[in-house]
């Protein structure tokens, strides 16, 4: 008698469990999120296919519900952050796959765009500069116009002509270069913005750690190279001939445009480059460098008030 009662109890409990499972199954299939996904399939969905895919359907509903209440990419509660599920029918089976959501794709696109502007020792505020945020001064309008024109028309590999921005301290030459880099980024043209004095110091140190060739290759091959504040460095024959000369020679041959900013005009920069760290003057070698600079750039004078005095 006891075994019969035990069996009846187990049967009753199993029936209750089955009823709950059936109710949960029906609720899941009738859910609007799941129903829309199933109705969107071109293949015929059978009851048997649904029964075999209940786990996938439940996961799809849960993850898609998260997406509908999205708290933002950084707080995404999905199993794969930034990815949303998709139902597809493969060989009479309802399968689940994951794909990046719009926020994930936008973040990835933003990351790729940011990587288009590489820099050595350039302040973050410069990297965020745009032509819209430039201060408009009549004395600087021509320089801004030429910079914008270059940004819109630059064609690395086909046209290696660049610009040479000359001006006194604090007139905004570097900020203007940041705007150029960002405009190029929007066009999908990578650029490399380099603060020249620190870059040359880095190249000297890289000889010891074995990274010299790797670093010089990255800079010389940049589709658009911006050498900021050239002439502010302590010059040496090695820097002039084996770093700057090598970079400019390669870029000239490959038709890769280079932009410069400097407190020196062409003639003053040539005198600066002629001095040797050994105390001599090497005018011919300096002239060779400057011939490349002059031939492949247009001279642009940047005028305006000294913004550094306001700080």
Image (cartoon, grey):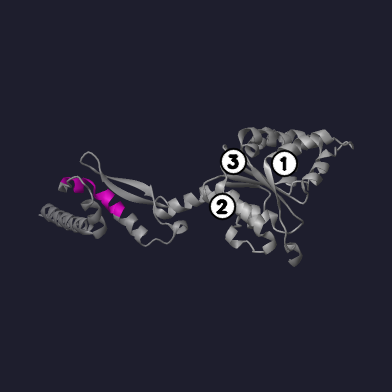
Magenta-drawn stretch contains 197: no
Which secondary structure, mark 2?
helix
Q: Which mark is residue 223?
A: 3
Q: Residue at x 52, y 46 (%)?
A: 188
Locate residue 143 relative to residue 68 in the image: left or right: right
Of 224 and 106, the residue lying toward us: 224
Residue 138 in which image quadrant: bottom right
CA–CA distance between discs 2 and 1?
24 Å
Residue 234 in which image quadrant: top right
Q: Main secondary structure of the magenta part?
A: helix
CA–CA distance between discs 1 and 3?
19 Å
Which secondary structure, mark 3?
loop
Q: Which residue is mark 2?
A: 183
Q: Which residue is mark 1?
A: 294
State the count of labels: 3
Quadrant housing the N terminus: bottom left
N-term-proximal mark, 2 vs 1 = 2
Q: Residue at x 70, y 61 (%)?
A: 139
Give the x, y percent position of residue 209.
Answer: 71, 35
């Amino acid at each position: 008698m006891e075994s019969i009662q035990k069996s009846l109890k187990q049967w009753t409990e199993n029936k209750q469990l089955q009823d709950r499972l059936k109710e949960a199954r029906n609720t899941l299939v009738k859910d609007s999120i799941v129903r829309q996904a199933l109705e969107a399939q071109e293949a015929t969905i059978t009851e048997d296919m649904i029964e075999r895919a209940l786990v996938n359907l439940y996961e799809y509903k849960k993850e898609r519900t998260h997406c509908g209440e999205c708290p933002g990419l950084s707080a995404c509660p999905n199993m794969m952050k930034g990815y949303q599920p998709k139902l597809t029918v493969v060989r009479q089976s309802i399968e689940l796959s994951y794909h990046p959501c719009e926020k994930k794709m936008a973040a990835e696109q933003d990351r790729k765009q940011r990587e288009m502007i590489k820099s050595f020792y350039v302040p973050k505020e410069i990297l965020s500069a745009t032509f819209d945020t430039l201060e408009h001064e009549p004395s600087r309008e021509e320089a801004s116009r030429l910079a914008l024109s270059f940004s819109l028309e630059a064609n690395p590999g086909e046209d290696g002509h660049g610009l040479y921005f000359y001006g006194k301290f604090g007139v905004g030459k570097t900020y203007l270069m940041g705007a150029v880099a960002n405009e190029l980024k929007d066009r999908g043209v990578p650029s490399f913005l380099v603060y020249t004095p620190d870059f040359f110091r880095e190249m000297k140190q890289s000889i010891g750690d074995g990274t010299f060739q790797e670093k010089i290759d990255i800079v010389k091959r940049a589709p658009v190279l911006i050498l900021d504040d050239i002439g502010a460095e302590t010059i040496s024959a090695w820097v002039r001939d084996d770093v700057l000369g090598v970079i400019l020679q390669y870029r000239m041959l490959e038709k890769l445009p280079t932009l410069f900013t400097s407190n020196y005009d062409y003639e003053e920069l040539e005198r600066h480059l002629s001095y040797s760290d050994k105390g001599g003057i090497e005018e011919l070698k300096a002239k060779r460098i400057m011939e490349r600079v002059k031939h492949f750039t247009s001279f642009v004078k940047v005028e305006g008030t000294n913004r550094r005095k306001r700080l």
